[in-house]
Image (tube, grey):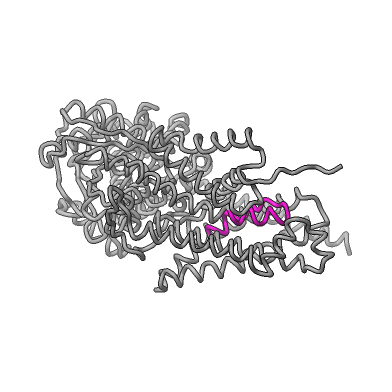
Amino acid sequence: MRFKNKVRWALLLSLVLLVTMVVGCGNKQDSEEVIKLGFLGAKTGDVANYGIPGEKGMKMAIDELNAQGGILGKKVEGIYEDNKGDSKEINLIAQKYITRDKVVAMVGDPCTGLTKVAADIAQKNQVVIFSAGATGAGVVEIGNYVFRNTMLDTVAVPVVVDWMLKDKHWKKAAIITSIDNGYSTALTPIFKEELKKQGATIVLEDTIKDKETDFSAQITKLKGANADVLVFTGYYTEAALIMKEAQKQGLNISLIGGDGLYGQDLAKLGGDAVEEKVILYCGFSTDQPSPETAKFLENYRKKYNEEPDMFSAQYYDAVMILAQAMEATGSSDPKVFKDELAKVKNYPGVSGQTSFRADREPIKSPVFLLTIKDGAFALVDKIPVKTE
Amino acid sequence: MFLEQLLNGITLGSTYALIALGYTMVYGIIQLINFAHGEVYMIGAFVGLFLVAMGANIFLALLGAMLFCMLLGMTIERVAYRPLRGKSSRLSALISAIGVSIFLSTLMALLAQTNTRSYPEVISNRTFNLGSLELSVLQISILAVAAILMIGLQLMIQHTRLGKAMRASSQDLDASYLMGINVNRIISATFAIGSALAAAGGVMVGVYYHAVWPYMGMMAGLKAFAAAILGGIGSIPGAMVGGITLGVLEIMGVAYISPSYKDAIAFGILIIVLLIRPQGLFGKKIVKKV
């Protein structure tokens, strides 16, 4: 009996192996017929607020491309793994996309640190990576396969500071940095330099840490500093809690920051403490849309029954720009179409116009200033950026 | 400004104190550092949030969270600690505690996802001036609830039969058993009371700082544990004073030195106190009898 069982097991096992081999071969043939794109982003965890809409935007772009016959007559296939906002996970996922799935390009990640991890791998393997959100320094410097489609802080901050001084007459600024947040520690010096350059005074510099919840001491200090505006360079969770604390202590001040504040949780956590008080700059708004954006909005609402945000728009544009470069060169080989990608000028995307400078850094126009109104993001101002 | 910072510190400290009480009470009786205690606090915050979202009054939500965590604390003790008691070393119970802690925080992350949630405004934010001091209704409510709970606990320990039995058990578990005290029931009650206080702390932090998430128990537990040691572990007044001291030290560190060193300052002072008084501020010196 026992022996018979063993034979049966062995037979079953070899059958399974055989089937997987056949299926495996089938997959390989498929990969020449389809063009694969890998999604980089978090679907769970702290930065899932960036990744989830990104995935939706990317899926929509791929569906639209396929409805029009794909790229170069080939079907486009997206692969969507969840990197949980973790640098170890994104490392494994990028390797998997390149070696197993044989993607021609990866779209994402929305975070700078994670993008760098994946970009190192992409550059080594000569696969294009197109981040839809990384704003920090040292990303495209990794190599000529690395691109990003997002509003850079070094491009936006001068425009924003100009607006703060000329439109709002906020001359005295306090700055709070989240010292264990790479995005924040990189953005603070850009703001400081620009504020000084344009003649504002910095009356208080303070720090917090991500995931802390008690900001009472910082706000009490801020109350004594007599600032016109608070510049906060961190993420939306802490921004909401800072404003809650300010409200609690009876301090009426506006908070201004970058697109790290762009998360739906800002309004959910902040409630009326952030209403028309928090102002952030970013590359996307659903108010006063361009014709391209209007069409995107309509389709997105129809498909998902919700509002798109900056990340869905930037992922969407990234896929479309990749498709355009592949069509123009007639090749889906990253070695070929990457050069065409670098030449994109004034691409009329749904997240504003995109151009690449000689150093492959994107210039996006216009800069949108948003605030929270009735629990949702609303446009304050729309400032065009000069492209060289 | 100094007075306001002091008040900020006392408010923060009173939440540490509520959690520290649970550590110190359990340690006092069975010499176990209950590392799952921070997670009980976290679950208390979530239960409160759930009840408030269902439309319950905040005080009802507070009671509900305390009741739920009472049962949770007793269950943890029954499932994870009692089977090990007496049969294996104290170290096994400690490892079991760490296991429960990881289990509870991951379970909550699965159930509620990991993003931060916020309590709606349940107590008015209205502020008023008392001399140069600016007070809010919220701050006063938090301090009042903490004070009522701590005074209640002190009265219970000093003046009830249960309190007497608890004090006896903490002096000598075996002797209390021989005197006819149902020691298992006393331990169970200790876990229940400690957990209820932690739950109250969780709800208060949720209402006051507006932030609730599945891993919040980790750091808060660590801070409260430090507060319990600072006050002298096993001593109930020690946990109260230790918690408030730690809160004030932290806030003063942020206000006058640097926020970057917030935790370093608090824990640095903890080390200094322990070097000078190893038994903590209120701890009794243990004389080893030969």
> In which quadrant of the rendered image does the C terminus of chain B lie?
top right
Q: Which residues are magenta?
A: B21-42
Residue B168 colored in magenta in the image: no
Considering only vertical position in the picture, is A183 above or below B125?
Answer: above
Question: Which residue is rendered at x = 28% and y = 46% of the image?
Answer: A317
- In which quarter of the view is residue A191 placed? top left
- In which quarter of the view is residue A361 placed? top left
Q: Nearer the viewer, residue B244 or B36?
A: B244
Question: Which residue is rendered at x = 67% and y = 56% of the image?
Answer: B26
Residue B29 colored in magenta in the image: yes
Considering only vertical position in the picture, is A241 above or below A229?
Answer: below
Image x and y of residue A143, in percent? 38, 27
Residue A110 visible in the picture: yes
Question: Which residue is rendered at x = 38% and y = 38% of the image?
Answer: B255
Q: Nearer the viewer, residue A23 or B256?
A: B256
Q: Nearer the viewer, residue A378 or A40?
A: A378
Image x and y of residue B72, in percent? 61, 66
Image x and y of residue A44, in percent? 46, 53
Image x and y of residue B183, in percent? 76, 65
Left/right placement of residue A63 relative to residue A169 reads: right
Question: Which residue is rendered at x = 14% and y = 33% of the image?
Answer: A386
